[in-house]
């Protein structure tokens, strides 16, 4: 099923760590049809008591435009996430993260009340976790194809004796 590559990677990473993950959740059903908002990735880890709402983006918008968009998404998240995991005691409010591929944040660390995370930092977190897992002995399970690809890259790149 086609999807957003960045959202797929975020969901895989959190599932791999033991989180229950909800993706592309339509929230705020309107009486005339449609929804108020879509939440990209919501992840809950009962054992660690962590609840994270992530909004990954490949946009190249100004910080002002992003502020408006993410304020709406994060407010909807705080309002509707408590109903996404029925029967579970959620730690509220959720940690909210705006993950950007295209951004130079300068001194900026937050946006619309959420944390800013850059793709370089996110990938460093993943690569640090998988780099010492040898593919032959501890391959990332095949249900996580993007993480497994990163594990292969971490183990075999740069190529020794071949093109760099």
Image (cartoon, rainbow, N blue to C red):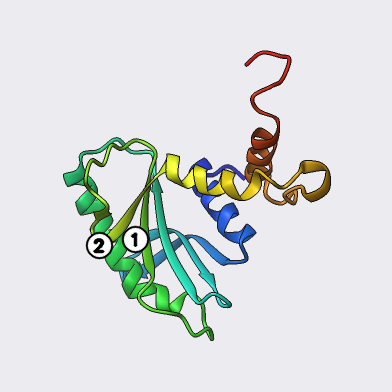
User: What's the mark number on residue 37?
Assistant: 1
Q: Is residue 116 above or below residue 114?
A: above
- The image position of residue 122, as x and y in percent, is 47, 47
Q: Nearer the viewer, residue 3 or 21?
A: 21
Tell me whether the residue at label 2 lies in contact with that at label 1, contact meaning CB atoms closer than 8 angstroms. no
Describe residue 124's horizontal placement relative to residue 155 as left or right.
Answer: left
Q: Is residue 40 visible?
A: yes
Q: Nearer the viewer, residue 62 or 27?
A: 62
Q: Is residue 87 above or below residue 43?
A: below
- The image position of residue 26, as x and y in percent, is 42, 63
Q: Quadrant of residue 107?
A: top left
Task: Report the mark closest to the observer, 2 or 1.
Answer: 2
Q: Label 2: state its secondary structure.
A: loop
The residue furthest right is 136
Describe residue 4's horizontal placement relative to residue 155 as left or right.
Answer: left
- The image position of residue 134, as x and y in percent, is 76, 44
């Amino acid at each position: 099923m086609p999807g957003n590559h960045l959202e797929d990677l975020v969901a895989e990473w959190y599932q791999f760590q033991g989180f229950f993950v909800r993706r592309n959740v339509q929230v705020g059903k309107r009486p005339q049809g449609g929804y108020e908002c879509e939440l990209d990735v919501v992840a809950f880890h009962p054992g660690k008591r962590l609840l994270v709402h992530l909004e990954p983006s490949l946009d190249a918008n100004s910080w002002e435009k992003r502020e408006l968009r993410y304020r709406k998404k994060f407010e909807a998240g705080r309002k509707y996430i408590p109903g996404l995991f029925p029967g579970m005691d959620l730690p509220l409010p959720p940690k909210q993260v705006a993950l950007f591929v295209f951004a130079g944040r300068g001194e900026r660390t937050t946006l619309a009340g959420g944390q800013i995370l850059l793709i370089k930092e996110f990938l460093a977190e993943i690569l640090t976790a998988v780099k010492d897992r040898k593919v032959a002995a501890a391959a990332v399970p095949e249900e996580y194809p993007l993480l497994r690809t990163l594990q292969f890259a971490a183990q075999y790149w740069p190529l020794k004796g071949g093109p760099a």
